[in-house]
């Protein structure tokens, strides 16, 4: 009888270990970024109200995306959901690059055991494979809770450096900065210049405040994009302009997904990739200096 009990306990322990090994989940996230207003372009003779409206509408569409996160106990892949292009929609390599500039594009692989990530990027017709260490955020765990999709979620906050190559980090300038720019605009009008640049109204902050909501009911150290480090799956992230919200979770589906990093592209660190993007964008800005105002040069994550 004792032997039977021992074997039963052994089999139970083995089955639990196997279940943990085979554990896998899928989460769907809706990402929305507040579209910038092009009000500063109204003084530009080259930008008509209709053009301004079209620019804002197109920007809004590009800033609303759906992502799929497939995860197991130690790793995950995060990728934008593939959609059929509508007639007349910008496509090809340009669309891929634009997606990369605003949080999409490529497959983001996270390994929380090795604390590393891999993401494939396309920039200026070249493919890069960014491989680096996961950013370490000093999360502050709060007592506040709320329900997301039937899961009890807890609040956590952190502050992180703003990526200079993520277009979504642009913020409207504060009133003091705007007053200074308004004086410059008046000087331009006096001298006959009426063109206004998008960058006159927006700035890149040094850091951004993050609010996240995680659920211990899904005990994995994972989340959307490069977010991780909390005692449960992150279901919502907000940085003041971009909100990423989980709309669906499926655990232990019958069909498993292979969770592994991409292999395509030139291997490069995040810093070297950012430096490459910034250098090319500065060159682009110099080439177009003096032209009519428009959106700032788009940059990748």
Image (spheres, helix red, strand yellow):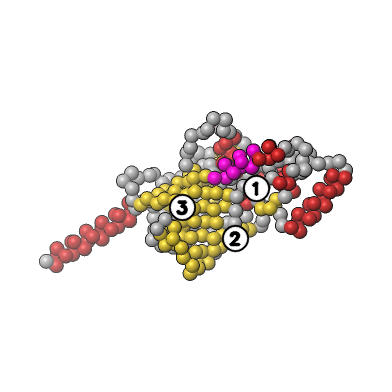
Q: Residue furthest left?
A: 1
Quadrant of the image containing the N terminus: bottom left
Please tell me whether mark 1 sits on a helix, a strand or a loop: loop
Please tell me whether mark 3 sits on a helix, a strand or a loop: strand
Drawn side of residue 70 relative to residue 161, left or right: left
Q: Is residue 295 visible?
A: yes
Residue plotted at (26% across, 61% down): 13
Q: Foreground residue, 74 or 173?
A: 173
Residue plotted at (52% across, 49% down): 31
- Report the Cα–Cα distance between label 3 and label 2: 20 Å
Asked if the magenta segment contains residue 62, the reply would be yes
Q: Residues within 10 Å of mark 3 (few under 14, many from 20)?
A: many
Asked if the magenta segment contains residue 243, the reply would be no
Determine which of the numbered discs, if any, sits on residue 209 in the image. 2
- Report the Cα–Cα distance between label 1 and label 3: 24 Å
Determine which of the numbered discs, if any, sits on residue 36 in the image. 1
Q: Residues within 10 Å of mark 2 (few under 14, many from 20)?
A: few
Of marks 1 and 2, which one's residue comes earlier in the chain? 1
State the image coordinates of residue 173 (x, y, percent, origin top left): 71, 54
Main SS, magenta residues: helix
Tell me where the magenta segment starts and ends, as one range: 54-64
């Amino acid at each position: 009888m004792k032997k039977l009990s021992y074997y039963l306990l052994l089999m139970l322990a083995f089955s639990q270990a196997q279940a943990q090994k085979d554990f896998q989940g899928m989460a769907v996230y809706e990402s929305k970024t507040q579209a910038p207003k092009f009000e500063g372009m109204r003084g530009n003779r080259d930008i008509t109200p209709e053009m301004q409206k079209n620019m804002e509408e197109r920007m809004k569409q590009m800033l609303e995306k759906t992502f799929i996160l497939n995860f197991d106990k130690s790793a995950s892949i995060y990728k934008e959901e593939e959609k059929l292009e509508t007639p007349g929609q910008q496509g090809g390599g340009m669309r891929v690059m634009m997606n990369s500039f605003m949080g999409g594009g490529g497959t983001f692989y996270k390994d929380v055991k090795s604390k590393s990530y891999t993401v494939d990027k396309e920039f200026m017709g070249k493919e890069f494979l960014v491989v680096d260490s996961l950013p370490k955020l000093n999360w502050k765990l709060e007592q506040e809770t709320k329900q997301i999709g039937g899961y009890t979620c807890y609040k956590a906050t952190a502050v992180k450096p703003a990526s200079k190559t993520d277009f979504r980090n642009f913020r409207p300038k504060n009133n003091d900065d705007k007053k200074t720019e308004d004086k410059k605009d008046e000087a331009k009008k006096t001298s006959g210049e009426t063109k206004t640049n998008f960058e006159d109204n927006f700035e890149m902050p040094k850091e951004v405040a993050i609010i996240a909501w995680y659920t211990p009911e899904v005990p994995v150290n994972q989340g959307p994009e490069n977010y991780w480090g909390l005692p449960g799956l992150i279901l919502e992230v907000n940085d003041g302009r971009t909100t990423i919200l989980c709309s669906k979770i499926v655990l232990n589906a019958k069909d498993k997904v292979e969770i592994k990093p991409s292999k395509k592209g030139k291997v490069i660190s995040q810093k070297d990739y950012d430096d490459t993007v910034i250098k090319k964008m500065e060159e682009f800005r110099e080439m177009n200096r003096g032209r009519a105002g428009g959106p700032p040069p788009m940059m990748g994550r």
